[in-house]
Amino acid sequence: MLTPERHRLILQLIKEKSVVKIQEIVERTGSSESTIRRDLNQLEQEKQLKRVHGGAARLQGKLQEMSMVEKSTKNLQEKKQIAKYAASLIEKGDCIYLDAGSSTYEMIPFLLQKDIVVVTNGFMHIESLLENEITTYLIGGYAKKKTRAMIGRGALISLEQYRFDKCFLGVNGIHPEFGYTTPDQEEALIKQKAISLSREAFVLADSTKFAEVSFANVAALNKATIVTNEIDEEILKKYKSKTNIKVVTA
Amino acid sequence: MLTPERHRLILQLIKEKSVVKIQEIVERTGSSESTIRRDLNQLEQEKQLKRVHGGAARLQGKLQEMSMVEKSTKNLQEKKQIAKYAASLIEKGDCIYLDAGSSTYEMIPFLLQKDIVVVTNGFMHIESLLENEITTYLIGGYAKKKTRAMIGRGALISLEQYRFDKCFLGVNGIHPEFGYTTPDQEEALIKQKAISLSREAFVLADSTKFAEVSFANVAALNKATIVTNEIDEEILKKYKSKTNIKVVTA
DNA sequence: TGAATTTGGACGAAAATGATTGAAATTTGT
DNA sequence: ACAAATTTCAATCATTTTCGTCCAAATTCA
């Protein structure tokens, strides 16, 4: 591996993760520890990074730029909280399916450095995924404007090419009797197929989704694990007997 | 292999990969290491690249940015002109394929009210297509960041589900002998398949594309009609005998 | 043919790499 | 809080890779 190539990779890793261990760089580059040390020293000379014991860290200036953009509507915070927790369920090397929709979209910033492959039917998601240097596949099909989702026969065929360790879905309704429901039957089909192709399925649900029923049935409650944040204990009871629920303890 | 030909290939490789090893250039050109060294030294003199130990790297200074900006602004009018004309070739009810890339992107505003169906592999195109209320299908596959194109096996499978009245492609090189060429072999495969699935194929070419040769072959000249704007009559002659050319009379 | 240019291989010099080792820093255990 | 254990560091050295130059062979051009 050529020197500038390594340097680029190192700077990119630092940009993504703020700090990076030498050992990780060694693994990623296949170069020896000595070489990486020399690289880090040189890059520090050039003021491209800061050496720290065990690795290297991003310089101060850029770090503050990152934490700048923070918006907070209440529901969005809730979604982010759930999204972050959902992302934490993903293990290194996983191949995951991300459903279209805002809930799963919020997971993307938390997928950094996970070394995963993502398949999605949400074309709104793509730019964000690529921005985070995540290996991304999009399924084909009809592009539905309203939800920014790929749907239809082409999407199903496309989806069937893959198998997933975990899938993360958004839905509109979660009901003890009627299970998971969503307004568009076409999208429901995609969600069903995604669940059937995954070893584990997760449904991201903020508090507004419980006890709601929408038009098209996706699956029974026990087909997926619900990921949500703190909700009323009595409501929770109704669901706990029917399926697993992972609750974020804010 | 002739000197200017090697130089073009070297610059092409560097443009694509940012850094390239001498050994790789040796393999691709079939020339000796000495020759490549001489080439690299010369190209460095001309400030076309930066020598690094083991190979060469793209120079990332003002010169690079200048040529990028210049390219995107200078050719934009030209591209729009060509795009508008290309769009005029589409008839009501057509089902068309739009290749990824900036040339075809410029066609989208001119597709209004055509009552057509568009299939594309460019996910950058989607938002714009939907904005213009055009029925849109995207093929699945791997999402390539650099060109915003869907590529790979999934994309080919996805693409094969469709048939087109017309397809519109962008390429990087158009050459009397080497035909249409593009830097990425994966993308070349997609373009090839698109051509084979279309009744008529069109290649959108601004003036910078002629007599250029890139890495991966897409098709022979006669497999598509070239859509371009006014260019030198003598250059035109070389191509006219090999394929149809539609010229925009600005 | 003969001169000029380009090419390919050889060889010593230079640079980069990887392994080793003892010192320094950090973590762990008590 | 202290010392032992572990990890990380910087310096050094042998090895590998790459560099530049030279020269002979091949190709091109006149």
Image (tube, coloured by chain):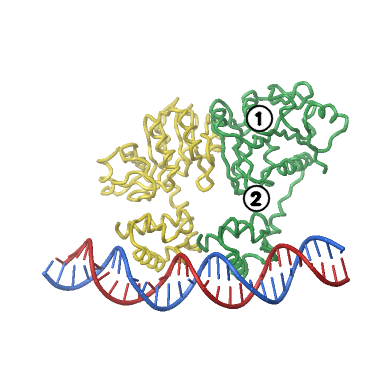
Chain colours: A green, B yellow, C blue, D red
How many numbered marks does the figure carry? Answer: 2
Please give the name of the residue rendered at 48% of the width and 57% of the height, measured from the top-left corner.
Answer: B18
| Mark closest to the chain's N terminus, 2 or 1 | 2
Q: Secondary structure at mark 1?
A: helix
Please give the name of the residue rendered at 42% of the width and 45% of the height, measured from the top-left corner.
Answer: B185
Amino acid type, callout 1? Ile
Percent from the top left, x then y, of residue B16? 46, 53
Which is more toward the observer, A30 or B52?
A30
Whether residue A129 sits left or right of residue B90 in the image: it is: right
Residue A200 in the image: above or below residue A58: above
Residue B141 in the image: above or below residue A220: below
How many other residues sit within 10 Å of disc 1, few (<14), some (14-19) or many (≥20)?
many
Percent from the top left, x then y, of residue A155? 56, 29
Residue designated by label 1: A195
- Residues flagged by tags 2 and 1 on a common chain: yes
Percent from the top left, x then y, of residue C4? 22, 71
Whether residue D7 sits left or right of residue B140 in the image: it is: right
Residue B227 in the image: above or below residue A22: above
Amino acid type, callout 2? Gln
Q: Disc 2 vs disc 1: Cβ atoms closer than 8 Å?
A: no
- Would residue B221 be seen by someone viewing this image from the given angle? yes
Percent from the top left, x then y, of residue A13? 62, 56
**Number of the label disc, if any, that sits on residue A113:** 2
